[in-house]
Amino acid sequence: MTLIELLIGTSLFVGGTGALFLAMHQAMRYGDFLSERQVMINAVQGRLEALVATDFDTLWTDPAYAAARQFPPSAAPYGLSEVLLDLPEGRLTIQVRSADPLNPSMPSILDLHVAGCWRSYGRLIAGEDANCTGTLEAGEDANADGWVDAPVIVSTRLSRSE
């Protein structure tokens, strides 16, 4: 075996081992991301279920939900932000809007929207909420629809039961 063959074999071995370690590292990061994503999905669904169980008039008139009802967004930031206990770098954004085109000031139907963003390994995993504060600041609403767009979003409509 010549020196050149030995160098080529050693470089292939070192390069292959390095590629294997890099692939394992990326697989572990992806696994952590999927785990955090599942925590966020559970949190968003749980919060939406709690909102659906809340009285219709409370959602529409209670001062606690004033930031969630702020639409059209005259002054940023808008959206009600909540910190997650299960995911320290995660935030939920709650938005409530009238879905009644005939009577928007006293609606019979509400749009409920809960979105979640979080940081994973120090990098941001979010849609429009660029700093992951749970609210949209000026310039963050890229598509100008007034809704927080994020990787995990759950929306529903709630009607007044009379």
Image (cartoon, rainbow, N blue to C red):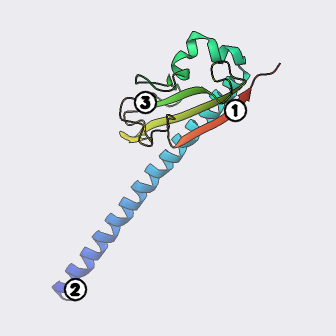
- As shown in the figure, which amino acid type bears the numbered disc 3? Leu
- The answer to whether 11 is drawn above or below residue 108 in the figure is below
Where does the image place residue 112, in percent across and percent down from the top left?
Answer: 63, 30
Q: Amino acid at mark 1?
A: Arg
Residue at 43%, 23% in the rendered image = 74
Position of the C terminus by quadrant: top right
Q: Are marks 1 and 3 in contact (CB under 8 Å)?
A: no
Q: Is residue 37 left or right of residue 75?
A: right
Which residue corresponds to the image point at 54% horizontal and 22% vertical from the top-left?
Answer: 68
Label 2 and label 3: CA atoms lie apart by: 60 Å
For the N terminus, which image quadrant? Answer: bottom left
Q: Residue furthest front?
A: 102
Name which residue type carries label 2: Glu
Q: What's the mark number on residue 136?
A: 3
Under circle 2, the secondary element is helix
Q: For the residue carrying disc 1, how many other residues have a C-alpha within 10 Å: few (<14), some (14-19), or many (20+)?
A: some
Q: Is residue 8 left or right of residue 122?
A: left
Could you say which quadrant of the image residue 161 lies in? Answer: top right
Image: 70 above or below 146: above
Check disc 3: other Cα within 10 Å, few if <14, some if 14-19, many if 20+.
many
Q: Position of residue 137 (x, y in %)?
A: 38, 29
Q: Which mark identifies residue 5? A: 2
Nearest to the observer: residue 105 or residue 60 = 105
Q: Of circles 1 and 2, which is in front?
A: 1
Of the numbered discs 1 and 3, the one sitting upstream in the chain is 3
Local SS, label 1: strand
